Image (cartoon, rainbow, N blue to C red):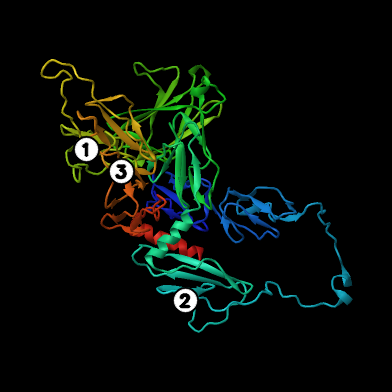
């Protein structure tokens, strides 16, 4: 039975073309709007969508002008902040804020609505209501024109080659000379080498154009991206039980600086044992993250099975793999048998499993398996999972506390690792399915440089670039006792010099035959031999290597390939991206490693033609 075409929501759209029983659609918002409410809806057997309540797309908040003050962290009047975000401001000398800080955007409205700065010591003026002829002198009624500005007009802006120019959204004529105060002129670079259109805007304010004017040359675009990317955000990886990802790579460092526009995705270390409070996705905007830091709190298993806590859910599987996605979903390979154990003390009643769809009935009850706790584990089983089993599975306790797991059944496999391997590198693929492992070894006389194994991630990409093999130095050793039986002094090498921005693994004294290994600090790469040996002539087998500034591995483009995969790239190196057949690239096709150790742009994305149309439609709706 069909549930009919889903209701559209203002400033949003839905994904999914199946409208019959058991199908799921998901709602999304156009750019800069935020979804509030449940984004997924399921077609029920009675022909209705569940849940009945539609989500909404909440607009951002526009920042008003502050007289005698300015916004912090790169914000300025006219810019917007997302729902749930906040921004602070400071006042000029001798002025103080007369409204609360920080300013918060809540459901499209700024609180407080009018941030102001007043001279310290001044009282906030009272409001006086006037009437009759007191409104205007002599009681005469005059016409007041609202929205008119008294600022000076601007002259024509400089032309930019290879760009399309618009005034207030209308194509600009070559002989146009009328640019009154408040006019907006936008420039759109014609799509070319950089793979995407670059746009910017200038505004006429009291006779002067405000805004940085660029040009449409590739080098200038990359330079402008560098300036924008300088508004970095600091991420402190200190929240217990929270794992965060950037470009599909887990962040393991304690403190990391991310470029503007970077998006971090977070989840709990175990989605069955912890629940997350806060946003799963955060974007770096103007030097600050656009949402609060997420946190994970333990459930009843961590609290002596307290009845006042949501229930812990354990996962057991057979006949196939399972994995946790970066955004906190449980990925299940088709055909897998999945058991979800909801923990609750049996003598206090029976929990209840609720499923967001009615595709089929699921076995549930207290476990009877050998070695399991039948007084604690209330089980729901998905036997030989199919894509139609995807949905939200919620366990609710008799105390009315619940914990939900979103299950996604999908046949995710990672690509073949048998091609384009480093010389002397051997690979053993245990499984290419999600959660599968590939292990690496080198031929005799060579050492693995990089991870010895990598895991297939829920995104369909391997967790790390493949390692390389480096030749092992085997020095010729001579006995200390010479031909005549006379013992000579022990041969030693001097303490090697520490490389700048690097360090040595191991410590002296260094005898003939000993080896040392050099490593570089983060964001630096080694140039030269990273292992040298102490020889019989008391000299080292090679010079001390250098640690040079470098860009780290930028991340994986899903459904695409990059020209070279390394742990580090030299300053000035370029890498190019291509998409799989039938997909369209959005973003810069080429990235350059800049002098500051940052990439010139974010990695591109590969979209289906349908995905591109939806993006274009969302941009059109915004206009």
Q: How far apart are the two marked residues, 3 and 2, measured between alpha carbons? A: 45 Å
Disc 2 target residue = 159
Depicted 527 relative to depicted 503: above or below: below
Which mark is in front, 3 or 1?
A: 1
Q: Secondary structure at mark 2?
A: loop
Read off the residue under disc 1.
Answer: 470
The residue that label 3 is drawn on is 461
From the viewer's perspective, is 561 left or right of 306?
A: left
| Structural crowding at the residue carrying mark 1, measured as other residues with C-alpha within 10 Å and reported as few (<14), some (14–19) or many (≥20) | many
> Horizontal and vertical percent for residue 24?
41, 47
Q: Are marks 3 and 2 in contact (CB under 8 Å)?
A: no
Within-10-Å neighbours for mark 3: few <14, some 14–19, many 20+: many
| Sequence-wise first label, 2 or 1 | 2
Which secondary structure lies at badge 3?
Answer: loop
Q: Earlier in the sequence, mark 3 or mark 2?
A: 2
Q: Which mark is residue 376?
A: none
Measuring from the top left, give residue 477's x and y in whole percent. 16, 25
Above-or-below relation of 186 to 126: below
Quadrant of res 605: bottom left
Counting residues from the start of the chain, the first of labels 3 and 1 encountered is: 3
Seen from the viewer's position, the closer of residues 69 and 131 is 69
Label 3 or label 2, whichever lies nearer to me, is 2
């Amino acid at each position: 039975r069909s549930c009919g075409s889903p209701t559209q929501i203002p400033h949003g759209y839905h994904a999914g073309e199946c409208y019959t029983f058991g199908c799921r659609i998901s709602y999304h918002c156009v750019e800069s709007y935020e979804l509030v409410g449940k984004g997924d809806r399921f077609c029920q057997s009675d022909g209705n969508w569940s849940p009945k309540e539609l989500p909404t797309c909440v607009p951002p908040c526009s920042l008003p002008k502050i007289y005698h003050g300015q916004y912090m962290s790169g914000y300025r009047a006219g810019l917007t902040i997302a729902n749930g975000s906040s921004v602070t401001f400071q006042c000029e000398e001798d002025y103080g804020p007369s409204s609360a800080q920080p300013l918060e955007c809540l459901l499209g409205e700024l609180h407080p609505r009018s941030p102001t700065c007043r001279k310290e010591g001044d009282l906030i003026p009272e409001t006086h209501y006037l009437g009759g002829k007191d409104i205007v002198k002599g009681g005469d009624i005059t016409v007041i024109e609202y929205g008119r500005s008294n600022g000076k007009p601007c002259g024509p802006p400089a032309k930019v080659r290879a760009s399309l120019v618009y005034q207030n959204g209308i194509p600009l004529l070559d002989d146009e000379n009328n640019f009154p105060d408040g006019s907006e002129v936008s420039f759109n670079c014609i799509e070319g080498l950089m793979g995407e259109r670059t746009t910017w805007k200038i505004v006429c304010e009291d006779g002067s154009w405000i805004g940085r004017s660029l040009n449409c040359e590739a080098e200038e675009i990359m330079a402008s991206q560098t300036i924008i990317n300088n508004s970095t955000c600091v991420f402190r990886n200190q929240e217990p039980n929270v794992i965060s990802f950037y470009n599909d790579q887990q962040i393991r460092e304690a403190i990391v600086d991310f470029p503007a526009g970077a998006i971090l995705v977070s989840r709990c270390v175990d989605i069955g044992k912890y629940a997350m409070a806060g946003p799963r996705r955060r974007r770096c905007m103007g030097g600050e993250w656009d949402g609060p830091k997420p946190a994970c709190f333990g459930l009843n298993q961590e609290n002596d099975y307290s009845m006042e806590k949501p229930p812990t859910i354990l996962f057991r599987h057979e006949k196939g793999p399972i994995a946790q996605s970066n955004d906190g979903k449980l990925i299940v390979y088709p055909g897998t048998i999945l058991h979800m154990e909801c923990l609750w003390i049996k003598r206090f009643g029976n929990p209840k499993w609720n499923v967001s769809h009615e595709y089929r009935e699921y076995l549930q009850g207290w476990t009877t398996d050998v070695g399991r706790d039948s007084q604690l584990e209330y089980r729901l089983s998905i036997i030989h999972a199919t894509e139609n089993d995807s949905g939200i599975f919620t366990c609710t306790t008799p105390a009315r506390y619940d914990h939900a797991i979103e299950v996604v059944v999908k046949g995710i496999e990672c690509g073949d690792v048998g091609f384009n391997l480093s010389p002397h590198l051997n690979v053993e693929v245990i499984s290419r399915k999600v959660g599968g492992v590939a292990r690496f070894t080198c031929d005799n006389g060579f050492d693995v440089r990089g991870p010895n194994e990598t895991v297939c991630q829920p995104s369909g990409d391997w967790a790390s670039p493949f390692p390389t093999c480096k030749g092992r130095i085997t020095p010729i050793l001579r006995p200390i006792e010479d031909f005549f039986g006379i013992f000579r002094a022990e041969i030693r090498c001097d303490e090697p010099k520490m490389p700048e921005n690097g360090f040595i693994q191991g410590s002296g004294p260094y005898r003939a035959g000993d080896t040392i290994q050099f490593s570089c600090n983060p964001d630096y790469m080694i140039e030269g031999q990273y292992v040298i040996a102490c020889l019989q002539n008391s000299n080292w087998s090679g010079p001390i290597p250098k640690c040079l500034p470098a860009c780290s591995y930028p991340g994986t483009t899903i459904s695409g390939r990059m020209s070279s995969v390394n742990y580090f790239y030299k300053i000035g190196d370029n890498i190019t991206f291509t998409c799989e057949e039938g997909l369209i690239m959005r973003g810069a096709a080429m990235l350059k490693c800049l002098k500051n150790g940052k990439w010139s742009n974010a990695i591109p994305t590969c979209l289906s033609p349908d995905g591109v149309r939806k993006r274009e439609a969302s941009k059109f709706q915004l206009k």
